[in-house]
Image: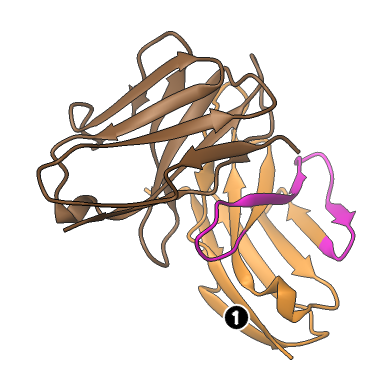
Chain colours: A brown, B orange
Amino acid sequence: GAVVSQHPSWVICKSGTSVKIECRSLDFQATTMFWYRQFPKQSLMLMATSNEGSKATYEQGVEKDKFLINHASLTLSTLTVTSAHPEDSSFYICSADAGTSGYNEQFFGPGTRLTVL
Amino acid sequence: QQQVKQSPQSLIVQKGGIPIINCAYENTAFDYFPWYQQFPGKGPALLIAIRPDVSEKKEGRFTISFNKSAKQFSLHIMDSQPGDSATYFCAAIRTGRRALTFGSGTRLQVQP
């Protein structure tokens, strides 16, 4: 299957700082990328859907000014957690699909563990 | 509103046993049902998926059973192995929408 990478795999930051997480599709072009958040022993919660070259669509309850998403190319999407606080500590996972219509398999990245002190 | 309900929350079986994980959905517009396997600290990986026009799909040791009238589907793992110990998520999606709706997950432990 196709490969999706995330960087960094883990990050520790101080409260109030901003953190950028990258999601890359390595061997295919991703028209759509998704960002999920996962708390320990819980399911994946969709945060936002990003399409290349357009603004991301955020799920209800997700602060768009806090979680900035940029999908500048067909192989890269970034999530920036601005002014991070301890409650933002979580496992962030991206996924990508290569389709333009209908449903296509989503390929998940390995995740990024964010710890805010 | 939880659109895909998954049970049990956790499951322990002996090696060689057949763990069964169940999911139920509410939205009849869903038309694709994948199962994902996730190991600790890793992203989910697609195991097997089914569409509602078939009642069963088998890939290797993994089988999905689908009951459209009951709006339920389940994952069976034949001859389970300790390496199958992971968290399993069912999911659902409908044509025209790109994002998956995940179940709450089942932590499976296969004891040697």
Residues drawn in magenta:
B38-62
Question: Looking at this view, is A101 or B23 the one in front?
Answer: A101
Judging from the image, mark 1 belongs to the subunit labelled B
- Which residue is at a point 66% across and 37% down the rendered structure image? A3
Quadrant of image for the N terminus of chain A? top right
Residue B68 to residue A33: above or below: below
Q: In screen coordinates, is A103 left or right of A33?
A: right
Report whether A12 appears left or right of B32. left
On the image, the x and y values in percent for residue A101 come to 65, 15
Quarter of the figure with residue B37? bottom right
| B41 w.r.t. A108: above or below | below
Identify the residue shown where x is 68% and y is 47%: B34
Where's residue B16, x and y in %? Answer: 83, 85
A114 to B41, vertically: above or below? above
Residue B36 in picture, x, y percent from top left? 64, 53
Q: Amino acid at mark 1?
A: Leu
Residue B28 can be seen, yes or no:
no
Please indicate whether residue A17 sits to the left or right of residue B93 in the image.
left
Classed neighbour count for the residue bearing mark 1: other residues with Cα under 10 Å, few (<14), some (14–19), many (≥20): some
**Please, what secondary structure does the residue beneath circle 1 have?**
strand
Residue at 59 percent across and 64 percent down: it is: B39
Query: Which is more toward the observer, B60 or A20?
Result: A20
Residue assigned mark 1: B11
- Snapshot quadrant of residue B84: bottom right
Q: Residue B104 location in percent, x, y?
A: 48, 60
The answer to whether residue A78 is magenta is no
